[in-house]
Image (tube, rainbow, N blue to C red):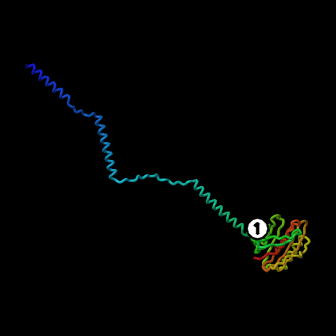
Amino acid sequence: MKKMLMLSATAALFLAACNDTTKEVAVDPTPVEEATTEATQAVEQATEQQEAEASASPTQPSTTVEPEATEQANPIEEADSETVESVVEQTEEEAIIEEADSETVEGSPATEVTPSSEITYMQNGNVQTAPTNFLTSAEQPFGLEVMNGFTLVAEEPGKDQLIYDADVRITMAIETYTLGEITYDELFNSALEEAGTLGEASPIEELPYHDNIANIAAFDVTIDNEKVVVMAIETPSTLAKFTIYDTLETDLTQAMIQMAATIKGQ
């Protein structure tokens, strides 16, 4: 009986022990699982905090800071600017020169100026008419009508030369005197004497008598193929002696006599 009781007690204890092992045992989490959990919680907390701060503070626009541009002189632009200024200055200078050329220049034929008059003359047996411009001497106090193709230049003090551009052998020397400096008779005798020193002088009968002419006389001399005319003219404003050198082939003597007859004192 005692053995039976002891076996029963032993069996009871065994069953009790087995029941204890079947109960759920609380298993502690591993270190990896703990770290993962903590990181997830930290991320969630940070996200919640950022969302809270964003909703609490106003949105500020982002500002883009651009680097300051350093201004540097462009040598090409500077060169272009200088070139433009040079061209403008050059253009202005050319405009001034052209304007001066278009005006009547003392001592040169005014080919670009509207003719102020005209002369009619005989040349190699033909009647010719040519426009003229009034030019003034740069050295002496006189002016006269000059046809195109002639240039008035100062040769020496008290004497100018009217030169035919196409043949410089054809010229007319002009010497002027103020009233009272010499008389017309003295001027007449001076012209006759000068012509006589060159050869046999003959008076020219047909001479132009304009309203401005008080007295006029001329003498011509022919030397080989050349003709020389010495002429004296008196006007209310001046006295003048002209010495004309011409060739028989060109025959511009009458043209130069006509121009000489337009002389006026200045």
Left or right: 93, with 57 as reference point = right
Left or right: 118, with 200 as reference point = left
Residue 115 position in % (x across, y down)? 76, 71
SS state under label 1? loop
Residue at x-position 58% and y-position 55%: 77
The one nearer the camera, 244 or 117, is 117
- Answer with the quarter of the image where residue 138 lies: bottom right
Q: Taking 188 as reference, is 31 above or below it? A: above
Left or right: 237, with 4 as reference point = right
Residue 76 position in % (x across, y down)? 58, 53
Q: How many numbered tags mark residues here?
A: 1
- Answer with the quarter of the image where residue 216 lies: bottom right
Residue on which disc 1 sits: 111
Within 10 Å of disc 1 (Cα), the crowding (few <14, some 14-19, many 20+) is some
Evaluate whether residue 88 shows in this view: yes
Q: Taking 168 as reference, is 41 above or below it? A: above
Evaluate whether residue 161 shows in this view: no
Query: What amino acid type is highlighted by mark number 1?
Result: Thr
Furthest toward the left, the residue is 1
Quadrant of the snapshot with the C terminus: bottom right
Q: Taking 212 as reference, is 95 above or below it? A: above
Residue 233 position in % (x across, y down)? 83, 77
Residue 47 position in % (x across, y down)? 33, 45
The one nearer the camera, 5 or 184, is 5
- Answer with the quarter of the image where residue 86 lies: bottom right
Quadrant of the snapshot with the N terminus: top left
